[in-house]
Image (cartoon, helix red, strand yellow):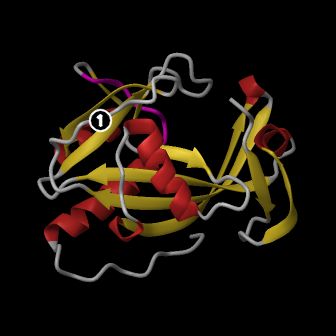
Amino acid sequence: MSTPIVDVVDRDNRPRGFRVDVNHAMRYGQWFRGVHVLVYTPAGDILIERRSRRIPTYPDRLDLSLSGIVDAGEHPQDTALRELEEEVGLVAKPSELELISVNRYNHRWPSLHARARNIMYHYLVQLPHRYVPLQLQRSEVAEAQFVSLSTARQLIRQHQLAHLGRLEPRYAMYAFLLDAVGQRLAAPTLPPETAPILR
């Protein structure tokens, strides 16, 4: 699998006019774009996945969102749709994605001698129900299942549940995404708020 090429941006998400491979960007702390997508249903079911044991970051941990790197020249929305299809086999339309925020993510990986500096686009996508066939990308996803919104919130509070496992430590981001889901389930007819940018 080839190394993704990314557009380098500044901390305010403005393109800097050049592209590098993602390993170079992480080695030198350059900003680039990424996405997270949380999948839910009107009944309050949340899709969670267990990361592959072969993946370099947080292997065998639970993840409440699907994530990916925005390739050079790619729109973040297209990345979100691509990751949905690649990771779990879900095909969605652009109109079914809801952008809820664009934030900075700045994290150092000492074990990888790298630094992830991302402008992260957060999306929600609603499925009509939980009974959908999933086709997992085994190199990244070991298993996937739906849990209730209350179970997902409990997982964030406790960081692990005996019958599920340990959660990837992105607790604040997960809580933000689940709060957004809760708001939409409580008032599904209200128009979505404008997505906050880099807050």
Pick the quarter of the image with the N terminus: top right
Q: Residue at x 52, y 63 (%)?
A: 77
Whether residue 171 is visible: no
Q: Residue at x 39, y 58 (%)?
A: 176
- Mark 1 highlights which residue? 134
Q: Residue at x 37, y 40 (%)?
A: 89
Q: Is residue 179 above or below residue 133?
A: below
Location of residue 126 in the rendering, given as x and y in whole percent from the top left corner = 26, 59
Magenta residue check for 168? yes
Q: Residue at x 20, y 38 (%)?
A: 147
Quarter of the figure with residue 21: top right
Q: Nearer the viewer, residue 184 or 160?
A: 184
Q: Is residue 15 above or below residue 82?
A: below
**Image-based side of 30 in relation to 164, left or right:** right
Pick the quarter of the image with the C terminus: bottom right
Q: Give the amino acid type for the residue marked by disc 1 in the picture.
A: Leu
Location of residue 36 in the rendering, given as x and y in whole percent from the top left corner = 49, 51
Query: What residue range appears in magenta?
Result: 164-171
Whether residue 168 is visible: yes
Magenta residue check for 136? no
Q: Residue furthest left?
A: 43
Task: Kindly state the secondary structure of the residue where label 1 is placed.
Answer: loop
**Image-based side of 190 in relation to 106, left or right:** left
Location of residue 60 in the rendering, given as x and y in whole percent from the top left corner = 45, 20
Location of residue 9 in the rendering, given as x and y in whole percent from the top left corner = 78, 63
